[in-house]
Amino acid sequence: MKKFDCICLMVVMLIAVSCTNDDADNLTQDVIIGTWKPIKEAVFADDGTPEVFDKTPCEQTSRFIFETNGNFTYTEFEDEEGGGCVPDESFILDGTWVKLGTGRYEFSFTYFNSSTQLGESDSQIPDKVVFSNANSTMRIIELVDEGEKYIELVRVNQ
């Protein structure tokens, strides 16, 4: 009987530990977590036609970093006149992210313009966040009257 009680106790402990680890993994392994670079952006012209712009090699060095603790940062790079690629120090973005459900996230952030010394806070909930290509591509979509306006990013391996 003692052997049976011991086995039952071990099974219960194993189940409890398994559930705890799964729950923790689910919280910290959201598909958005990681480093992403922008590759293209789509907007609409005044006549409603879509315009897709590929990011330049310099602009593709910009980075969104989404952390497991719910924070994110964005560092933007821009092409310099005459060549070169530099960080856009006039635009600094830090914020938090929260998953609201499948394909739904809220991004709250503060951006600071070092040129004007002004900061502003905002919060946005895009209409959709879609992951594709084995979760290596992310598209943040805003639905507008003309169609979808989006930015497309790819995961950067570190």
Image (cartoon, rainbow, N blue to C red):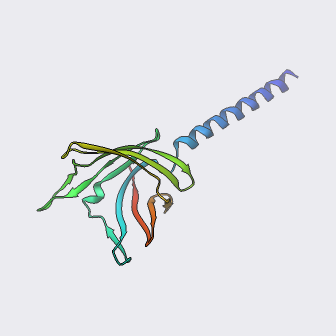
Measuring 46% from the left and 47% from the top, which residue is drawn there? 33
In this rendering, position of residue 17 left or right of residue 53: right
- Comparing 46 with 57, the one in front is 46
- Check the image and report above or below for 117 versus 135: above
Residue at 38%, 76% (x, y): give it. Answer: 48
Q: Is residue 87 above or below residue 83?
A: above
Q: Tell me residue 115's x, y (percent).
A: 18, 46
> Which part of the image, by quadrant, shows the N terminus?
top right
Q: Position of residue 44 (x, y in %)?
A: 36, 72
From the viewer's perspective, is 93 left or right of 80? Answer: right
Residue furthest toward the left?
82
Q: Quadrant of residue 94?
A: top left
Q: Considering depth in this image, is 129 or 133 the residue closer to the camera?
A: 129
- Quadrant of residue 20 within the rendered picture: top right
Residue farthest to the right, as pictured: 1
Residue in the picture at 52% in, 48% down: 99
Number of numbered discs: 0
The x, y position of residue 87, in whole percent, is: 22, 50
Q: In this image, 13 relative to 149: left or right?
A: right
Q: Give coordinates of residue 146: x percent, y percent.
A: 43, 73
